[in-house]
Structure formats: C-alpha cells, structure tokens
Amino acid sequence: MIELTAYNFSFIMMTLITILPALGIAFVNSLMRSLLLLILSFIGVAGLFVLLSADFIAIAQLLIYAGSISILLLFAVMLTPEISINNENSKYFLLASLGAILFLYLMILLITIFDLNQLTGNALNKLDFDNTIEQIGTLLLGKYIIAFELASVLLLFALIGAISIVRSSESDFDVKIKDSK
Amino acid sequence: MIGLEAYLIVSSLLFAIGIFICIGKRNLISVVMGIELLLNAVNIAAISFSRYGSGFSDQSDALAGHVLVIFILTVAAAEAAIALALCVLVYRHFNTINVSDVNQLG
C-alpha cells in the first residue's frame, strides 16, 4: 500500500479527475455533457503535467486543449442540429470494449516486464533550472528548428483548409446577397 | 512511491478509453473527442518518460519529450480544426453525422 504523502494524494486525485470523466464520455448519452466531461479530463491531464514538473506544457495544455480545442468542439456540437446530438454507442460496442481491454492487458503486461521504478529522473534532476521554458525555447529554435518551421506551415495550411472546406461556394453567396436585397 | 510505472498505467488507461470511444460511438464528433483523448494519453507517456528517464547522451535531450509534446499539441489543434470542418461538411451533405450512415462518395 502506498503511503499518503501530499504528492501521492495529488497524483491519485489528478488520476481520478482524468480517468473518471473520460469513462463518463463513453457512457453519457448527451453529447453536450460528454463534451463538458472531456474538458474536465483535459484539466486533469494538465494537473498530471504539473506533478511531472512540466510547467510550460501544463499551461499549454490548459490554453490549447481546455481552452481552444474544447471551444472548437463546442462550436461543432452547437452547429449540428438537435437530431444528431445523441451520443449513443454503435453496434460495435462489444468489439470496442474487447479491443480496449485487450490493449490495456497488453500494456500492463509490457509495463510490468521492465523494472521501470528504478528510473528516478537523474538526468532532469541534474539540470537544475527554475522553469523549463528557457530550455524548451533553446531546443525549439536550435536542434528542432526545421520541425518548428514545418509545424507553422502545417498550422497555416490547416486553418486555410478548414476555412475553404466549410465555406459555401461563391455563387451561393451571391444568390444570398441578391435575395437579401 | 509513485514512479514511472504509475504514470504509464494512467496513460494506457486513458488510451484504452480513447480506443473504446473511437470505435464504440456512432457520432462523428464523439469520435473526434476519442482521438483527442488518445493524443492526451500519448502526451502523458512522453512527459513521464522525459521526467523519469536517465542516461541521455546529451544533457539537453532530457527535455526532448517536452518538445515532442509541443509538436503533438500543434498537430492536435490543426487536426481538430480540419476534423470539425469535415463534420460540418458531412452534416450538410448527408443530413446526419452518424458514422455508419456516411457510406457514399457522391
């Protein structure tokens, strides 16, 4: 049995905040509620990042996942009318649960083979810094500069692509303007 | 003592739930939510390996996991935008976003 230090207690709480809402998404029938549960799960993951001493990633997780991606999902939920807002399970329910349980079994088998708890993070402890932001910035603009630039190009293309996919064709737009006149 | 093993088990639990949601839901938006959960699970694994891993040849490699997670965040944002645009498009074309009903190209 693990002793109840502050760290262990926070770990257990953050795990519960992450896992229970994620399970809730699978079993709640309203799409809106499952979206709110998803946001709660994202916040729990951010808490786990804080416990792993990844401060910058935790803030980025809160801003990008709990902030913007959930708002995007909210827009998508609200743009599709009420008929399609149900969150029922498909006919592959059994197959899905079988796949998930099999995956979990394999992963736990794989994790317990190695003696992973002997790793104590010496490399990170030796680095001795106040926060990770400076180190990450140096890595991003030094060693990983090409990937960084490619990611910016990817984001630009994705945003332009998303706009041009959902925009209705130009002739439709003209017709609407003429109608309104 | 909470170590790497506990974090990896949490990560694989989250990944298993993500797989379940991806396969077992009939709504396209729920499938996108499942994909976001999968990406989050991978993020937890990457960060925990970065925290507890040792024996990097280069000192600065200790934070390579963080950089990987930043790229995953970027790709996740792009992927969410595109996927939700496709959801809206599919709804306009088929009048449903049930995955099993979307089975025609034309």
Image (cartoon, coloured by chain):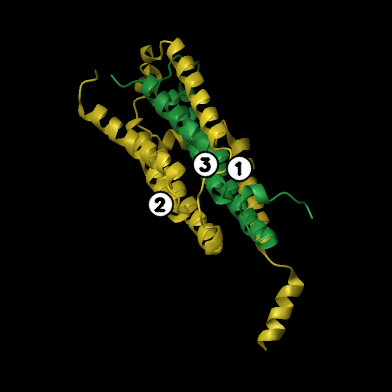
Chain colours: A yellow, B green
Above or below, comparing residue B60 to residue A160 in the picture: above
Residue in the foreground of this view, choosing between B38 and A121: B38
Q: Quadrant of residue B2?
A: top left
Work out which residue is located at the far right of the displayed protein and give it.
Answer: B106
Could you say where residue B33 lies in the image, as x and y percent from the top left? Answer: 51, 45
Do badges 3 and 2 share one subunit?
Answer: no
Amino acid of disc 3: Gly
Question: Which amino acid type corresponds to the residue marked 2 in the rendered image?
Answer: Leu
Frontmost residue, A22 versus B66: A22
| Quadrant assignment, res A32 | bottom left
Q: State if disc 2 and disc 1 touch (CB < 8 Å).
A: no
Name the residue beneath numbered marker 2: A36
Report the residue marked by disc 1: A151
Residue B104, compared with residue A11, is above or below; it is below
- Tell me the crowding category of disc 2: few under 14, some 14 to 19, or many 20 or more residues within 10 angstroms, Cα based: some
Q: Is residue A10 left or right of residue A137?
A: left
Drawn side of residue A155 relative to residue B70, left or right: right
The Cα atoms of the two marked residues, 3 and 2, are separated by 14 Å
Amino acid under label 1?
Answer: Ala
Q: CA distance from mark 1 to mark 3?
A: 23 Å
Front: mark 1 or 2:
2
CB contact under 8 Å: marks 3 and 2: no
**Dot 1: element:** helix
**In the image, what residue occupies the spot 39% across and 20% down?**
B5
